[in-house]
Image: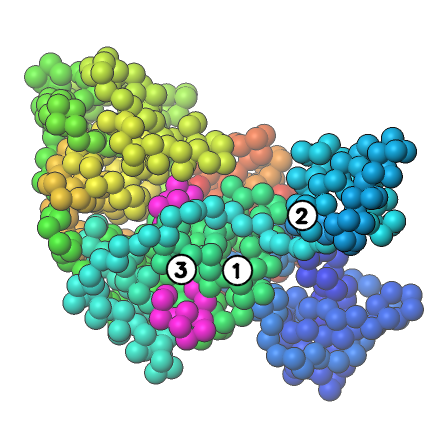
Amino acid sequence: MTERYADVIIDIAHEKVDRIFQYRIPEELTESVRPGVRVHVPFGKGNQEKVGYVVDISEQTDYPLEKIKTVTAVDERGISAESRQIQIAYWLKSQYGSTMIAALKTVLPVKQKQRMLEKKKVLRCLSASETARAAEECERKHQRAKARVLSALQTEEELPYELIRQKLNVAAATLQTLEKQGYLTIEREAYYRNPVKMADRDEIRPRLTSVQQHIIEEVLAAYRAGRPGVHLVHGVTGSGKTEVYLGIIEQMIEMGKQAIVLIPEIALTYQTLLRFYKRFGDRVSVMNSTLSAGEKYDQIERAKAGEIDVIIGPRSALFTPFANLGVIVIDEEHENSYKSEASPKYHARETALQIASMCGASVVLGSATPSLEAYYRASRGEYQLYEMKERPGESVLPVVHTIDLREELKQGNRSVFSRKLKSLLEDRLSRGEQSILFLNRRGYAGFVSCRACGHVMKCPHCDVSLSEHRNGMLVCHYCGYQEMKRGKCPSCGSPYLLGFKAGTEQIEEAIHREFPTARVLRMDADTTRTKESYEKILSAFADEKADILVGTQMIVKGHDFPRVTLVGVLAADLSLNQNDYRAAERTFQLLTQAAGRAGRGDRPGEVVIQTYQPEHYSVVYAARQDYEGFYEEEIAYRELMGYPPAAHMLAVLLISTLQEEGEMLGREMTELVKKEMGSVDGLQLIGPTEAAIGKLSDLYRHIFYLRHGDYQVLVEAKDRLEKYCRERGLKNQTVQFDFDPMTVY
């Protein structure tokens, strides 16, 4: 029988995961030793027995056989939260391609153990009269610091430690001396850092609609029946999806279960946390990148200890080690930020499904504009679909105006504001109502369009926009097609063939020029660098300290401002013409989400979408708030082209210090695929070619793609390529795998 070896980490703390030790697996434990289990192993020179975690299994070892020790036993205490984290890391490594170390560092959210904070108080050990005499004695000996402490303790049996240190100006050494002399005792109590600092718990519970109540009951009934499953809540903006989440989680907590709530942006944390805190109080916490190392560590410890029931945060919160996980909620599930950009390039939705299956938990996905992947699976019966097509109460969907910027140019308007938007802004300012101006700028890839007719320069082979390079070439980053940039539009002959360039600062300046009295807040990457900047800007706008909020995508996702009655989308085309097969989907989602910020209170809202392509189906369906219409048109395109979710894609990115080495490795790897998997029916190979950004930080980037209808076929291809890279021994090169990529390479 072939020898098998277990890779074991002795300490699961984050800073220890780089130290992996190999142990021989004895024949009698072959079936029970697997990734994630706890094992007893001999460790160190004295072979002291330690508990470790198996992170991988292999049939070869890098160490001399005579030095390999043997696993003693498997820990029989069952699956712990830590064991589950190891299993998740192993799954990430296997499904998405990375090293086990990288996967472990993804799953373990705290870098190293942090010191617990302590609350200290000083207790009097003597009677009041005895303490008074001791104070007098200290005063006689000119020990005035001691005298101040003892005098204060005459009237109070206990005092806060910091009060004595700061108000009485007493050194720690003085207090320690008094403790040794028996005059007082210093009592220490460890406590967790809590990043949630909210005082207001007053909650006005809205009356649930029949639709909301039905969804809550259905999700919980399936869970209680042992069919937790995946539930997709497709609700128009403002339809009350958060109340559905709250209702489900509330009853899960009553059953002794815990919940993870994922949100796509840190900017959403404050409003979401406020809603949940009002319902659940201190049993709610948050996990995101703005927390200190100590705060992160303490939230993990609180979760392990069962001191919190709900954790809220972006995708990293998914790995919170709850022992009794009952539900994972992914709000705005369509968002790109749920896909990791670092290896392993996992998707939070797929990973949540895996974690839920391991824990027997339900998954609830929510969005006004579900990802095509989620809706596709729901249409095939893999997910349970629920529809929420109306806003509760008096609130109605806004009126949408689509403005053709080509006509604005013909009429001589070169301003960033169309005449309609300018008129509506003046109206809102006069009525004391608020407006949001959204610049759809993130992900700008340098597309070129005609300002006169709206024609976009596209690749003749791929139906995606060409990107403008500094050398004057227009390049397709899918197939490598190139052409020289023209001086005139090939459609109408206009000389206005330009790239769109604008930023939030320019928009803010334009508002001040057009509306000098308007109070303006700007929210973008520059204004949200500090820890509490999101909350400050959003709170100021919610408190009506500004008339207009200008920003990028972070301002149109999930926020609820009742006095906002106007939303202006300044440049819909920026996302529409990205060099990406998902461009239409992203544009539709952004426009629909932006429109959903208007009219959420008791006043009707209006939306202005400014575009050079008002006839594009993503703009047309977004203006109608018609998701089903958009889905039918977009999925037909995906099925025709073999793009996800109709099929699956694997992007293989090669990064090298020398361009020639990257080109050679790309040829070798694609030849390997042709040789070993050429007989697989339906497997398509595209490339290799230079990546969209061919050189980054002095490293050269090349890319090739594999496409197939079966995800596991691509996993097999990934495994073969990983094995080839290990055997070849890459030195100045890195290979990254990205399944169903969300961005263009």
Query: Which residue carries the number 2 mark?
Result: 156
Q: Secondary structure at mark 1?
A: loop
| Magenta span of residues | 249-272
Query: Whole-Å distance between the Cαs marked 2 and 1?
Result: 43 Å
Q: Secondary structure at mark 3?
A: helix
Q: Which mark is residue 280?
A: 3
**Residue under the image location 29 percent in, 34 percent down:** 543
Query: Which residue carries the number 1 mark?
Result: 320
Q: Quadrant of residue 254?
A: bottom left
Between tags 3 and 2, which lies in front? 2
Q: Which mark is residue 330?
A: none
Query: Hey, which residue is sitting farthest bottom in the picture?
Result: 28
Q: Earlier in the sequence, mark 2 or mark 1?
A: 2
User: Can residue 352 be seen here?
Assistant: no
Q: Quadrant of residue 569?
A: top left
User: Can residue 471 be seen here?
Assistant: yes
Residue 55 point in image, percent of width and height: 66, 66
Q: Residues within 10 Å of mark 1 (few under 14, many from 20)?
A: many
Quadrant location of the C terminus in the rendered image: top left
Query: Whole-Å distance between the Cαs marked 3 and 1?
Result: 18 Å
Q: Earlier in the sequence, mark 3 or mark 2?
A: 2
